[in-house]
Amino acid sequence: MKSNMATQSITYREALNQGLREALQNDKRVFLMGEDVGRYGGAFAVSKGLLQEFGEERIMDVPLLEAGFVGAGIGAAMAGMKPIIEIMTVNFSLFAMDQIVNNAATLQHMSGGQLNVPLIIRMGSGIGRQLGAQHSHSWEPFYAHIPGLIVLSVGTHEDARSMLYAALQSPDPVLLFEYTMLLNLEKEIATDLPIASIAKAKVLREGKDISIITYGTGVYKSLEAAAELATVGIDAEVIDLRVLRPLDEATFLASIAKTHRVLIVEDAWRSVSISSEVSARIMENGFYNLNTPVQRLCGIEVPIPYPAHLEEAAIPQKNDIISAVKKMLYRN
Amino acid sequence: MDAKKGLLLLYQMLLIRRFEEKAAELYTKAKIRGFLHLYIGEEATAVGIMQALTDNDTVLSTYREHGHALARGIDPDVIMAEMYGKIEGCSRGRGGSMHLFDASKNFHGNNSVLSGNLSIAVGMALASKKQKKNNIICCFFSEDDITKCEFQEAQNLAALWKVPVLFVCENNLYAKGNAVRYSHTVVELEKKGIASSAVDGMNLIKVMQAANAAVEKIKSTGKPCLLICNTYRFRAYSMFDVELYRAKKKVEEWKRRDPIPQFEQFLLQQQWITESEIVGFESKIKTKIQKALDFAEESAREPLEQLTKFVYTEI
């Protein structure tokens, strides 16, 4: 089978770009709106070439007003369009939080099911490049807290290529966290990917000794850690949560039933995080399958500092994952 | 305007007034809970604006929205049931007084805490433009929105995109307790240069003229308009407000400009209505409101098993 499958070597940026092009080609109602998405080609060059291909009607540059254009996206979505809103980085989404939390997430409910907001919000996210405390946020837990939103984390090239299409089929608002640290990273993926699920987590590496549950930039770090652990005889399973709301509990509970050990890895601050939630679900529904207590590697609880060595130390790295796993398996 | 239309508009204003008086009474009896913001005194604005719109236009409202909903033609029965939190309410009881929705009437009620509706309206108008629908999105808001950046953002986008939004600012002179004179450099907000026009919001005929002109302008140019209606709420900000910020005398002064008697006088002068017909109107409305109340009382409550319905679309 594998030999028949055509593949392409592609950067995460190109994968996102292909996903956007496909969305715009497939459905006339789709349009992309955000700061610098048109003439500039996207703050991170993700939408490069799209203005030339699809025109100003469908690739809309907007002024700097997150609340304004997210609100406009909600309005357009309710009125029958399929807007894809790009918030340049997740840091700026705070300006639009009222629109996202109070309007996008509530309108279906408040209207007793009369209204839908089929809106996509894409946000550059992640920590690195020494951007300092105000430009290095992991707001996945904020948004994953909100009923009415679907929160997706685009941790792999496959998902960068195919998740948007699936998200566009949703009648409800979807937030896509994309990771700017991955943009230049090149990977080999299948040219024809199956339609992505926006309901399921994914086991990216099967293993029997421990389950590493992660998302976002934790995914490739965990896979690399697992590859190294394999060289010392530790067989780690790696799960990319992908869907942070609603959480796919079944996939990670099944994994734990097999491995009996779990390490949760994320960049977000430990307190009240995605890992807190996953850990609680395991406690509630998987406790008797555990051989050791759930362990977590999270962001250190500090505003992300500017110096490179402190920044690096503030979030889990591959070696931290390796050490934590070895410790849990008493293989120091 | 002719006699028939005049009578309809008077009927609508009276219906709003009496409906809200009943709502206030029901609030004191704990039949209606949460926040209840009454529109009494401002009826000419809702009725004058709404008559200028067609069924294809969309209306976004504020948290002081019963008047808008009634003037849009939503059945008082389902509005009352909504305020009772009952299943037959226009938002299935999930919204309450502040969140009245009726998609079949393109009435999007109050979508927001404050000001969020402004850019949502712009987005709906953008969709209309893209879909070549040739309709108008009418967005009511209040003078306290003008100080917020959301207002500036929405105005900028609407003008930039040249989309058909009718922004209607209901300036009733008080945010909650803070008077306009303490939050703006001028009380006459039209002097800020934000509006296409301003009108005496206590005078139905003047509101109608301004609304019709604005709608015509939007239809012919495709561009947004902002109309300020200078008005006054006779009642407290909400049922929790003890009104320490204004003198009773001031309210009484404004009541002399009550839009309903003003318009009744006009109709009487035109000999389009008689005193006894007005009394007949009152009794018809009384019956209608009693019917709404009975409907709300009898409507069922949402079963508890349905608590988490309408959070995500069921596919």
Image (cartoon, rainbow, N blue to C red):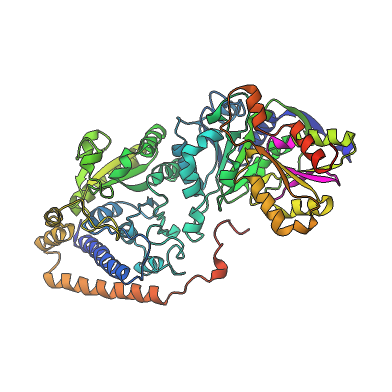
Q: Is residue B228 above or below residue B162?
A: below
Q: Is residue B83 above or below residue B215?
A: below
Q: Nearer the viewer, residue B234 or A11?
A: B234
Place of residue B219 in the rendered image (x, y in percent of width and height, measured from the top left): 34, 42
Q: Is residue A23 visible?
A: no
Is A207 left, or right, of B86 in this rendering? right
Place of residue A146 in the rendered image (x, y in percent of width and height, measured from the top left): 55, 50
Is B29 left, or right, of A56 in this rendering? left
The total number of labels drawn is: 0
Does residue A38 show up magenta in the picture? no
Is A295 left, or right, of B113 in this rendering? right
State which quarter of the image contains the N terminus of chain A: top right
Is A205 left, or right, of A168 in this rendering? right
State which quarter of the image contains the C terminus of chain A: top right
Q: Is residue B38 above or below residue B275?
A: above
Identity of the residue drawn at 21% across and 64% down: B7
| Residues in magenta, as a range | A199-220
Identity of the residue drawn at 72% across and 59% down: A285
Q: Nearer the viewer, residue A196 or A300?
A: A300
Q: Nearer the viewer, residue B124 or A307?
A: A307
Q: Quadrant of residue A316?
A: top right
Place of residue A295 in the rendered image (x, y in percent of width and height, measured from the top left): 73, 45
Does residue A217 show up magenta in the picture? yes
Q: Is residue A247 visible?
A: yes
Residue furthest toward the left? B269
Q: Quadrant of residue B233?
A: bottom left
Identity of the residue drawn at 52% across and 33% down: A34
Place of residue A100 in the rendered image (x, y in percent of width and height, measured from the top left): 50, 45
